[in-house]
Image (tube, rainbow, N blue to C red):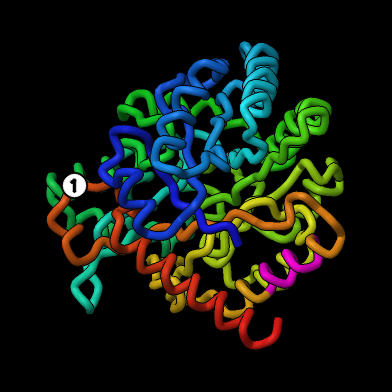
Amino acid sequence: MRESFRWYGPKDAVPLSAIKQAGATTIVSALHDVPNGEIWSIEAIKVHQTLIKKSNLEWGVVESVPIHEDIKQRIGNFEIYIKNYKKTLENLASCGIYTVCYNFMPVLDWTRTHLYKPLEDGSTALSYEIDALHAFDLFVVKRIDAEKDYSLQELEAAKKYYDNLDNTQIDTLTKSIIAGLPGAEEGYSMEQFNKRINAYANLDTDTLRSHLIQFLSALMPTAEACGLNMCVHPDDPPHSLFGIPRVVSTAADLRALFTAVPSLNNGLTFCSGSFGVRADNNLLEMFKKHASRIHFLHFRSTQRDGKGNFFEANHLEGDVDMYTMVKYALTEEKRRKAQGRSDWEIPMRPDHGHQMLDDLNKVTNPGYSAVGRLRGLAELRGLALGIQRNGL
């Protein structure tokens, strides 16, 4: 696996020099200053690329080229935004960047209710509490007809949760969910957030899936001509939020997507943590089924409690069988290399590390402090070496 690290640009609290010391060789990054829907110019790509090269690192994966909300709803200027997206892909390929991770989550990107859950060892982790999300939806956002989406038991639990919050806790919860997590590209005021979710009120699962398929169908000729791989990231968490459907959450979702758009350039970012939140997702079967089109790996593990809550576990703990996941990844690389595929080595990055040690006293992007990800990368590197030395 090609060891990678995410970098949010010159303002990132974790500099490229630290990533270099962690042993990663590939940078996962994006032009976060370019507004959603606009073209990434060759000049801007090269400036960012040059910054990375100066540290003797390679910008190997884009995460992400965000998809404008008009494309997801197929309204307004969606055709212009698709045209712009194609041009961005062409420009990236002309600069030698051929892997683009993206997601199709409406309104919100990855979502957590708490960014600093205290753990027994003194570190903190990202976490998601279902009652907190429901309480926010019902009593802070006050989404129209939201109560229809919940059972009586869920309504009572959300009300109890909300009643125990003070104003500071409500403000913290609000910021955690809608202010914009790192990589989410967009943050919202409460007024903007309400407007966004109301725009999806009449959009069902089949329609959203159709919009994703139409988007990818339009992109594939460009991607194939450029030799560029699009890698959809699964929904995080992998279920509906605020009454809005999500369509990259389950094995059935992947089957529908790749059946409709079978090109291998229509690929997958296999995020073991996102898929692993659902107990009904068999990660190993999903990996084997789609191994040939997995172009990017996010290895992390989540710990479920069976009630809808989860937190980010250490990389070799939690509900994900990381030994088998890494073994499958290495086996797929071996198969590709034997076939003579130039993309046989799959970029992998450790995801969502704990905030720990010196980073507890620093202001860093939630989930993207240096030491927690360094620990994750070191553990995954050691696991991979052990598997290889054991005769893979």
Q: Position of residue 201 (x, y in %)?
A: 56, 32
Q: Is residue 156 visible?
A: no
Q: Is residue 189 above or below residue 358?
A: above
> Could you tell whether 314 is left or right of 85 in the image?
left
Q: Position of residue 199 (x, y in %)?
A: 53, 25
Q: Position of residue 376 (x, y in %)?
A: 41, 67
Q: Is residue 209 above or below residue 336?
A: above
Residues in magenta? 328-336
Q: Is residue 289 visible?
A: yes
Q: Assign the N terminus to one quadrant of the image.
A: bottom right
**Residue 192: quarter of image:** top left
Q: In the rendered image, which residue does mark 1 sit on? A: 363
The main secondary structure of the magenta stretch is helix
In this view, the residue farthest toward the bottom is: 390
Q: Position of residue 106 (x, y in %)?
A: 54, 36
Which residue is painted at 20% across and 58% down in the image? 359
